[in-house]
Every structure is written in C-alpha cells, then in structure tokens.
C-alpha cells in the first residue's frame, strides 16, 4: 500500500539497500540507493587501481567472452593489486613502501621496458602501500572497491541499484537533473542519483549505448534496445531532437515472467476470466491485448502463453525481444534495423518476419505489437487459419477498430472480424484508493455488417469500478463458446450450454493449483501439461 510520507529502508540484494525518504516540498519522495561505497568511499583509490588494471588487461593472453568470465578476471586482478587487512591486524611497517608514487613509478618503468613500451602517469592513492605496490585496504573498503569497479566497468554503472530493485517498473532521465522512477509500492519517486551537466549526461548515454552494442551518433541519435536483463531501453542523444538534452527511459521486465496466477493475485482478473481465456486460446481463437502505455499488456500476453497447447509450435515476432514462451518448439524472431554498417539492404522488418513465419507452419503466431503494415499480414494469417496473439495501443474496442482500419495499418473492414477476442486493460483508480492494473473487459468480435458498415461485439467479462470485481456478462450468450468452439467440437446445439461447465471446471483447476503453490510461470506450465496428458482437459461431446 502506498504511503504519503514513507521513511523506509529495504534490501535490494546482499550488498545494496534503498532508503525511501519523504520530501515535504514535493509530490515525489526521495529514492536513495545505499551501495557499499556509501559508507566506505574509495574515490581516491579508483584512479590508481584503474591505471594498474589497464596495464594488466593489456597483457591478457585471451580476452574473456562472457560477462561472468570478465567479472572473474577483473576480480582476480583487483585481488593482486590490494592487500586486505583483517580486523585487528597490524601491518609490519618494514613492509610498507616509503612512498607509493615512487614505488609505483619504478614498477611501471620496469613493466613498460620489458613488456609494452608505452608511457603512463600514475597517481597516488593516499592509502598506505606495501613495498610490492599493493594498496592496504580494510575488508569494507575492499568490498566497496570491488563493487564499484565491476559495477562501472562491466555492469550498468550508476543504474545498477535501480535495475537490481524488483520493485521498480520504469526508470527515466529527462535531461540534466535527477533520475525519476516509477515504484510498484511508492509510485512516482525522484532519486538522489542524477546528472550535473549535459556533458556528464552525454558521456553516460554514449557509454550506455556502447555497452548494449547499439552506438549513438548524430546521424543515428535514437536507440531502442534490450538490456542484458531483458529490460527495454530507449535512448535519445543530443539537443537537436531533444531540447532538454539527452534522455533515456528503461521499462523493466521480470527475469521470470509473471504467471496468470500471479496476474490474478494482483487483481487484474479472476479465475473465471483466466479459465475462459484458457478455453478460447486452446481452441485457436485470435486475441489482442489492448490498452494504453504501461497498462500491463505485454505482461498479460506473456502470462497467457501457458494456456497454449504444449505440443504446439509457437513463433514470436518482436522489434524488441520481451516475450518468453514456455514451449520447447518456439521460434523467436526479432526485427533488425539498418544503419549498422551492413548495407542498406540489411533491414529486416516485422512485416518481413511475419511473411516468413507463415512458411514455418506455426500453430500460433505471437506479435510483440502491431503498429503498421505488418497488421495486414497478421490478419491474412488469421484468415488462413493461423491464430495470432499480440498487443495493441487502443483504449477501447471502438478505438482499436478505428486504428486497424486507418493509416498506417489499413486493414479492410471485412477482415477485422477474423479477430476473435479483445482484452481491454488499463491502470485504474481503485475504490479504496491507490492505482492498479485491471482488465476492464474481455470482448468477443461477432461480425461485420457491410450494409451498415458497423461491427458487432459483446463483452464477455466487465470490471465493476465501484466494487473492484468482475462480472461474467457472457454466461449463457457467449458467441465464441457456443457458436465457434462448441461447433468446432461437434457439440449438439441442444447441449451447447455444457461448454460453460468446462469453463467452471478449469476455473476450479486454476484455483486448486494456486492453493497448492504452483504460482510460478514455469511450474504452472508444467502442471497444465501434466493435467492435459492425464486427459483432464478433454471436453466430452
């Protein structure tokens, strides 16, 4: 529950804590990362250690490939450059060098003469130094030094505490000034971490882009990419297109996707809605998850993939990889922008990938988001019997149809009813206060009337904002359950109402799995697979 004046410290991991501190003069409270270097400053040592590291890395026989290997090499080098003094230990004064700078210069001179042949200007650290050049540090100083060097040289620098915090959803830098975040509990916060001037900010975003192998230039000042942990990042460089200067936004994602049971825990939907979607997706209905920005569309889409038959072949198509599908037979394709030096013909669009996917015999096609001409291929796929699931930016079914039929997507109106389901999702104000994400409605597209040029659709489920509850308005009148799925299964017309019993049964299965503790994404998928193999999901005709 959010608090107006929070004063809370909580752990992010073994080395980092966060202090949420109230600001009486601002609607945004403070977010204060507490890193190992917070209490044990190692700024004076860093330049000396970094200089030594450069020379040690220069003579490496083989460059480490993985991030884990690079961290291990760096950690070993740091251990060679320092002497960690244990609590209560007194260092023999005869071993301490008379002057670190003189000793280091002599070592550099010897090293350069025999190995490299380059010049260097070492700095003094201000810390006592052994005769062999090692700097004497306490255990706490050593941990702070190791953390800072690995953080800045290999990991994501000052962004590390933000990216490590599981309670953060969005990280935003609008220009010079503080970094802003959106917190799952405390909502909008401002950080004590920020940028003092445009030069510092520009340097940071250039390094950030290089670290994710998407370099920025004045010719290509915008980068959309994925961080190593799967988070989405957008970077805009320079003042020519951003008047407040360089900026970046990071949309964090969970390392393990949320399951539909965890979505239910958040209150976004209930067991009956999940069971209804389970039946629809298992029997090949095409679905859009639609809503505004940051309404949880991708989270919902990913959670629903556990309902797709485990034997199916799934193809995902995205411009930024976000989706994680639990199926073994999963083809993951990502669009590729041009401008990376491979030539003008190197661009691979989502349109190209969708066309290629139709030749791969998929049982389901998942599209990260439809924005343009790839929409026509997606609807052509639906016409040819390939169920499609994707996210879409529209706040209602009417607006969704308007966007589909207008520029730049331009789907013919007669094609639109190939889409079966539309989930409308949004961030809403709750009756008791606070905000949360809710499925406002699950809608069935019934058909298109060419005479009136109108579409008919019905809401199968509706959210009641007064009680924060959901109503199964489609019980007894569902077009998809009775006219599509029941017909597909060969259920006689006089027994089509039996299909609702299947929804009830699956809702109870989900509830029992939840109570039994199978809430994690992978656990739930394996249990659903096991239940299916036992024949418990077979609908009797």
Image (spheres, rainbow, N blue to C red):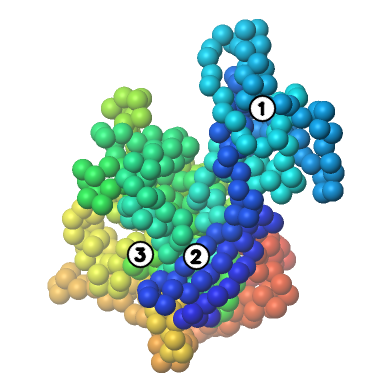
User: How many angstroms separate mark 2 from mark 1 (CA)?
Assistant: 39 Å
As helix, strand or loop, the secondary structure at mark 1 comes to helix
* Earlier residue among tags 1 and 3: 1
Structural crowding at the residue carrying mark 1, measured as other residues with C-alpha within 10 Å and reported as few (<14), some (14–19) or many (≥20): many
Mark 3: few, some, or many residues within 10 Å (few <14, many ≥20)? few
Residue at 50% in and 49% down: 158
Closest to the observer, 436 or 149: 149
Mark 3 vs mark 2, foreground winner is: 2
Going 23% across and 62% down the picture, which residue do you hit?
403
Q: Is residue 454 left or right of residue 91?
A: left
Q: Residue at x 31, y 24 (%)?
A: 343
User: Tag 2, which secondary structure?
Assistant: strand
Is there any visible trace of residue 109 in the rendered image?
yes
Q: Which mark is residue 293?
A: 3
Foreground: 496 or 456?
Answer: 456
Tag in front: 2 or 1: 1
Residue in front for this viewpoint, 273 or 482? 273
* Residue picked out by circle 2: 31
**Residue 49, numbered circle:** none
Residue 287 occupies which quadrant of the picture?
A: bottom left
Instruction: Give the Cα separation between the discs numbered 1 and 3.
Output: 56 Å
Q: What residue is shown with label 1?
A: 100
């Amino acid at each position: 529950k959010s608090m107006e004046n929070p004063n809370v410290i909580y752990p992010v991991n073994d080395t980092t804590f966060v202090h949420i501190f109230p600001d009486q003069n601002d609607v945004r409270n403070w977010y204060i990362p507490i890193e190992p270097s917070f209490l044990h400053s190692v700024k004076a040592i860093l330049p000396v250690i970094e200089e030594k590291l450069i020379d040690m890395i220069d003579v490496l026989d083989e460059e480490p490939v993985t991030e884990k290997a690079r961290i291990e090499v760096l950690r070993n080098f740091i251990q060679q450059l320092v002497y960690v003094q244990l609590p209560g230990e007194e260092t023999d004064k005869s071993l301490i060098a008379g002057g670190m700078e003189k000793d280091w210069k002599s070592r550099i001179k010897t090293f350069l003469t025999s190995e490299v042949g380059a010049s260097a200007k070492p700095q003094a650290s201000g810390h006592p130094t052994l005769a062999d050049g090692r700097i004497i540090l306490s255990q706490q100083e050593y941990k702070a030094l190791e953390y800072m060097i690995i953080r800045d040289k290999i990991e994501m620098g000052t962004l590390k505490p933000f990216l490590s915090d599981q309670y953060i959803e969005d990280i935003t830098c609008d220009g010079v000034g503080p970094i802003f975040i959106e917190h799952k509990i405390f909502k909008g916060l401002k950080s004590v971490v920020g940028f003092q001037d445009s030069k510092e900010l520009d340097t940071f975003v250039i390094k950030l882009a290089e670290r994710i192998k998407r370099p920025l230039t004045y010719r290509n000042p915008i980068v959309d990419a994925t961080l190593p942990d799967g988070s989405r990042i957008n970077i805009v460089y320079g003042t020519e297109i951003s008047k407040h200067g360089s900026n970046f936004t990071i949309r964090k994602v969970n390392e393990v996707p949320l399951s539909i049971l965890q979505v239910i825990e958040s209150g976004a939907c209930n067991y009956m809605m999940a069971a209804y979607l389970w039946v629809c997706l298992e029997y090949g209905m095409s679905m859009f998850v639609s809503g505004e920005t940051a309404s949880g569309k991708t989270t919902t889409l990913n959670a629903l993939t556990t309902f797709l038959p485990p034997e199916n072949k799934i193809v995902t198509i995205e411009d930024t990889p976000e989706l994680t599908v639990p199926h073994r037979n999963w083809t993951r394709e990502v669009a590729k922008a041009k401008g990376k030096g491979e030539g003008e013909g190197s661009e691979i669009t989502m349109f190209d990938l969708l066309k290629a996917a139709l030749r791969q015999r998929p049982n389901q096609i998942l599209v990260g988001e439809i924005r343009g001409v790839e929409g026509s291929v997606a609807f052509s796929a639906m016409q040819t019997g390939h169920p499609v699931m994707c996210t879409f930016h529209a706040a209602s079914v009417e607006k969704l149809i308007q966007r589909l039929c207008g520029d730049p997507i331009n789907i013919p109106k007669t094609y639109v009813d190939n889409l079966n389901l539309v989930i409308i999702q949004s961030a809403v104000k709750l009756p008791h206060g606070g905000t949360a994400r809710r499925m406002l409605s699950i809608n069935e597209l019934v058909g298109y009337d060419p005479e009136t040029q109108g579409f008919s659709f019905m809401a199968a489920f509706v959210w009641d904002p007064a009680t924060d509850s959901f109503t199964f308005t489609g019980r007894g009148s569902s077009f998809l359950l009775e006219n599509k799925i029941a017909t597909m299964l060969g259920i006689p017309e006089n027994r089509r109402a039996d299909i609702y019993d299947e929804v009830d049964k699956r809702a109870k299965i989900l509830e029992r799995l939840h109570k039994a503790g199978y809430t994690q994404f992978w656990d739930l998928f394996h249990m659903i697979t096991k239940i299916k193999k036992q024949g418990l999901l077979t609908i009797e005709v």
